[in-house]
């Protein structure tokens, strides 16, 4: 099931990123940051009263500096309207209504989607009541006074947010694996999709009525069904407008969220770019199976070392995804296109892998016996037990005496031990450290 998307919009300086951090703050505290991974923090899972959602700060939505999207607040608001389920329109209670607020309002008024106005920077409601009520003139029904800085009103805001989630129908497609091709423009996503759909073993049909413009495509390969997520634009013969915007961050994130496996397409002729890294970061963060696909392999002059050299470069540039298999393909010649589906199945399986608790603990305790945790100012980390709490991605909770004693390098070591023992090729895994009791 796709998570509902909650977008924070608003002009600069109203406190969007403060609000974003406030809402996800709790979550950040338990999930370890990985150095090297792109952590833009413009989106994250949030949770309120056991309801999960994707929270997005549209203020930071750019692919790179050439991307004009973020330049204008109206574009940003439009993006939120198109791509999200609930919109938090953040305004500044201290400055009152500005022209930019009015511009955003104009766009948000046209949508049927729920808009909640969060009047921020209200630390003393009694004194600032007038400032708050002023915003009713924007014409939105739902309004909350908040202070992103100190937490006032955030619970009320989130209550309203989750009240507006609609129960989406169950996934019609059952357990069909969902695949998405992601990557920057011109790396060959459309060509790959078309090639895959054009190959003779594949039977294709559209799935009507997926979320408005996100058209999914169903394909059958040897009796098995797969879904290509968000193929709108990818299957069109000519792409009228080359669309950085189409493959905007939000769109990519949503496609990843709705998929089981993300195929990150990289152009062999350019190698890994900054933008590629950023998109790779989204896939990693999404917790889904990941395949790195180096396309346009036909254009590369090769000798015995070429694959090795490319592999080394990719591993260096995308070091946070060293678990992802790399495949060298050509949409033009069709080289290795038939390997895609088998690889997708493998990776999806690893992403859904569940290891019995006793086995996990055996592996971890053997590892600890050989390489004990380092001591920190005379105190030693003690791991009491480990348990896999979920799949997709496989997530393990380590119960310890004092989580402050768990260092990133040791956690990395433990992750490697789990990978050595159980595989997990093609999937990120998450390790969470908690104090026992
Ligand atoms: P953004 O540009 O909309 O993402 O805004 P930021 O989150 O970067 O905040 C802009 C400024 O407003 C910063 O100086 C924040 O410290 C400040 N700010 C954010 N939230 C609050 C709040 O609730 N109260 C007050 N007084 N200041 C805030
Ligand atoms: P997208 O923007 O990622 O969907 O990329 P396209 O599929 O539109 O491809 C961009 C350009 O690269 C087009 O001119 C394609 O013909 C070309 N292209 C795509 N895949 C290959 C490939 O494997 N080899 C070669 N030589 N060109 C390719």
Image: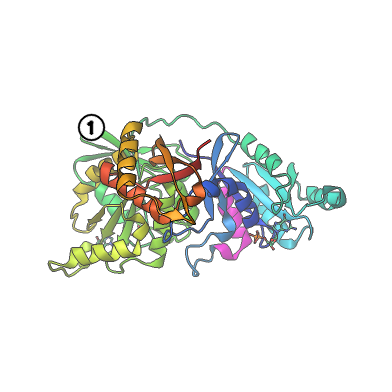
Q: Residues within 10 Å of mark 1 (few under 14, many from 20)?
A: few
Question: Which image quadrant: the N terminus?
Answer: top left
Q: Is residue 71 left or right of residue 240?
A: right
Residue at the front extreme, as displayed: 378
Give residue 209's quadrant in the image.
Answer: top left
- Where residue 275 appears, x then y in whole percent? 41, 64
Disc 1 designates what residue?
A: 223
- Where residue 233 appears, x then y in whole percent? 40, 52
All told, the count of numbered labels is 1
Q: Nearer the viewer, residue 285 or 140?
A: 285
- Where residue 77 appears, x then y in whole percent? 61, 54
Which secondary structure type mostly characterizes the magenta part of the structure?
helix
Q: Is residue 88 left or right of residue 215?
A: right
Q: Is residue 341 left or right of residue 394?
A: left
Determine the residue positioned at 24% across, 45% down: 343
Q: Nearer the viewer, residue 40 or 176?
A: 40
Where on the image, by quarter, is ligand 2?
bottom left
- Where residue 272 appears, x then y in whole percent? 33, 65
Determine the residue positioned at 60% across, 52% down: 21
Can see residue 390?
A: no
Name the element at disc 1.
loop
Residue at the left extreme, as displayed: 304
Can see residue 416?
A: yes
Q: For the magenta stretch, what is the residue range? A: 70-85
Determine the residue positioned at 68% across, 62% down: 13
């Amino acid at each position: 099931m796709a998570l509902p998307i909650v977008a924070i919009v608003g002009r600069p300086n109203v406190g969007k990123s403060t609000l974003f951090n406030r809402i996800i703050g709790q979550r950040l505290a338990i999930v370890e940051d990985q150095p090297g991974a792109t952590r833009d923090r413009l989106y994250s899972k949030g949770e309120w009263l056991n309801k999960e959602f994707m929270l997005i700060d549209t203020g930071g939505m750019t692919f790179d500096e050439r991307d004009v999207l973020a330049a204008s607040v109206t574009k940003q608001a439009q993006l939120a309207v198109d791509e999200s389920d609930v919109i938090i329109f953040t305004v500044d209670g201290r400055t009152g209504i500005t022209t930019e607020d009015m511009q955003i309002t104009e766009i948000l008024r046209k949508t049927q989607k729920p808009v909640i106005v969060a009047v921020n920077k209200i630390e003393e409601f009694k004194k600032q009541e007038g400032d708050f009520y002023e915003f009713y003139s924007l014409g939105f029904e739902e309004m909350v006074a908040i202070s992103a800085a100190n937490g006032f009103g955030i619970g009320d805001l989130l209550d309203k947010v989750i009240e507006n989630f609609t129960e989406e129908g169950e996934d019609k497609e059952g357990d069909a694996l969902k695949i998405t091709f992601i990557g920057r423009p011109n790396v060959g996503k459309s060509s790959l999709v078309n090639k895959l759909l054009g190959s003779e073993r594949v039977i294709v049909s559209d799935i009507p009525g997926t979320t408005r413009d996100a058209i999914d495509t169903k394909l059958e390969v040897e009796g098995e069904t797969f879904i290509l997520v968000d193929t709108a634009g990818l299957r069109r013969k000519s792409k009228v407008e080359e669309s950085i915007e189409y493959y905007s961050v939000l769109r990519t994130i949503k496609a990843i969220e709705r998929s089981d496996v993300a195929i990150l397409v990289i152009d062999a002729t350019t190698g890994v770019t900054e933008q590629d890294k950023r998109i790779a970061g989204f896939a990693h963060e999404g917790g889904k199976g990941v395949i790195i696909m180096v396309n346009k392999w036909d254009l590369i002059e090769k000798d015995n070392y070429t694959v090795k050299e490319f592999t080394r470069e990719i591993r260096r540039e995308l070091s946070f995804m060293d678990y992802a298999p790399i495949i060298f393909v050509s949409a033009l010649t069709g080289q290795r296109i038939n390997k895609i589906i088998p690889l997708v199945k493998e990776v999806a399986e690893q992403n859904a892998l569940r290891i019995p608790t006793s086995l996990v603990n055996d592996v971890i305790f053997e590892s600890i016996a050989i390489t004990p945790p380092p001591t920190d100012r005379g105190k030693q980390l003690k791991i009491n037990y480990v348990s896999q709490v979920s799949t997709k991605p496989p997530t393990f909770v380590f119960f310890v005496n004092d989580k402050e004693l768990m260092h990133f390098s040791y956690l990395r070591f433990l992750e490697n031990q789990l990978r050595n023992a159980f595989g997990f090729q093609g999937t990120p895994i998450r390790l969470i450290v908690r104090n026992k009791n």
